[in-house]
Structure formats: C-alpha cells, structure tokens
Amino acid sequence: MGDLAQSNLPRFDEPLHPRLGRYLQEHTRAWKATISRADAIVLVVPEGNYGFPAAAKNALDYRNRERAYKRVGIASCGDVPAGTRAMQMLKQEITAVKLTPGSESVSIPFLSQEVGPDGLLRANDVMDRAAGEVLAEPARREEGRRRQRLAAAVAA
C-alpha cells in the first residue's frame, strides 16, 4: 500500500513528459514503483472550495504509463455534501488520464464529527458497507466481463 501523504511529492518537477517514462527525480522513481505494484488505487480526498485538493491532481500528473487503465475507488469527505462535488470533478480527471473510476464510492459527511480524539476516523456501518462495495466492485465487473466473453464464445 502506498500513501500519498508519506511520499513527499513536490509539485511536478520532471523535465520530460511522464508519457516518456524517463524519470530523473528519485521521488518520481519511488512513486512509479509504488503505483506499478498496485492492482488498483483508492483515493481518499477531502473537498475544499468545491473541488479536490491540488495534491491529488499533482499525484495524477506524476504518473502516466504506470497508472493507465487501473481501477480507482474514491472516498470523499466534507461537510454536508460529503465531498461529492470533489468526487465528481476527480472522476473527470481520472478518466482523462486513462484510469477507470468505479461507480461505488464512500462519502463521509461531517468528517470532523467522525474523527476520534486519537485523530483516527471512526467508521460507521454505512461507511463500512460502502468501503466493502468499493473493494468488491472490480471483482464483480471482471465476473461480468468473463460471462460476456463466455457468451460470445458460445455464440460463435
């Protein structure tokens, strides 16, 4: 598991476009290794000023080939709208950079009320169920594709 908060990525500072895959900065090579190992990506994003944070955009800009076509689950948080506006904006960005967003998500309203004195999120049953759906969705989609391939082979 990789954590963007622990990666210390500066603003994108590679002299060459990411699509070339020739990274000169050590932090970029480390982030590449993290993303390359992942089967899927889960983004946890707060909403601020009706959008997602610049750090999330920056992390997406750093990767090109390594992240293409990977599945992405999103957990968003905020006040009343629970980060849903940020999530919708992020889905547009994710699709534009060849990632595959899921249709399931975790929305956490009133985040400050859900964080304990230790600074950790106290997930409730709704959040737990939603997280389970986010994690189960890729397998469900693959099963659906498997059935379609099988039906096509039988029809041929």
Image (cartoon, rainbow, N blue to C red):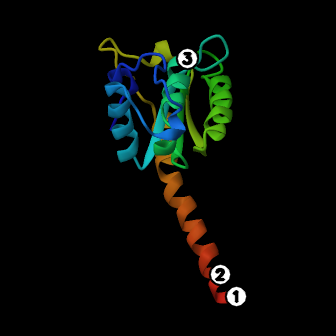
**Tag in front: 3 or 2:** 3
Q: Label for residue 75?
A: none
How crowded pointer 2 is (Cα within 10 Å; few <14, some 14-19, many 20+) is rated as few
Asked if disc 2 and disc 1 are in contact, CB closer than 8 Å, the reply is yes
The residue under label 3 is which amino acid type?
A: Ala
Element type at mark 1: helix
The residue under label 1 is which amino acid type?
A: Ala
Q: Percent position (x, y) of residue 50?
A: 67, 15
Q: Quadrant of the C terminus?
A: bottom right
Residue occupying the point 56% across, 24% down = 57
Image height of 89 relative to 33, above or below: above
The residue under label 2 is which amino acid type?
A: Ala
Q: Is residue 52 left or right of residue 28?
A: right
Q: Percent position (x, y) of residue 13?
A: 46, 19
Element type at mark 2: helix
Q: Is residue 77 left or right of residue 117?
A: right
Image height of 98 relative to 26, above or below: below
Q: Is residue 101 left or right of residue 22?
A: right
Q: Quadrant of the N terminus?
A: top left
Q: Label for residue 151?
A: 2
Q: Label for residue 155?
A: 1
Q: Label for residue 54?
A: 3
